[in-house]
Amino acid sequence: NSALDKEAVSRGTTFYLVDRRFDMLPSLLSSDLCSLHGKVDRLAVSVIWTLTPDLENIKSTWYGRTVIHNVQAMTYEQAHNILHGIAPDHSDAEPPPPLTAGAPVD
């Protein structure tokens, strides 16, 4: 029930309009301390699931403290391009390598 908790509850979520956004958290947190900036380590608590090949069942679960190291900060457009196999900044440039999300790690 800290002042931060009360403020977050009153805001509910971050929402976006065409020309601005309204952050759930104060900007120091939402734009800096809780953001994944390029080449900056962030401490996190993570849940790692190992799934069956059909992705329908959880084989194992791991909870632990982790470090997230974001290689590059991106705009939404750059991330969209990568997800669609387009180079982040130029549609005529070499496409990025394929995503590894969901690939087996065993």
Image (cartoon, rainbow, N blue to C red):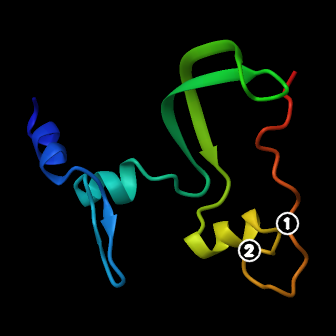
Q: Are marks 2 and 1 in contact (CB under 8 Å)?
A: yes
The spot of residue 71 in percent (x, y) is 68, 54
Residue at 10% x, 33% y is 2
Residue type at mark 2? Answer: Pro
The spot of residue 40 in percent (x, y) is 55, 49
Residue at 8% x, 39% y is 3
Q: Quadrant of residue 4?
A: top left
The spot of residue 88 in percent (x, y) is 73, 74
Residue 75 appears anywhere in the view? no
Quadrant position of the N terminus in the picture:
top left
The spot of residue 14 in percent (x, y) is 31, 58
Residue 14 appears anywhere in the view? yes
4 left or right of 101?
left
Residue, disc 2: 88
Mark 1 residue element: loop
Residue type at mark 1? Answer: Pro
Q: Quadrant of residue 41?
A: top right
Residue, disc 1: 96
Front-lying residue, 65 or 103: 103
For mark 2, does the 10 Å Cα neighbourhood hold few (<14), some (14 to 19), or many (20 or more) residues? Answer: many
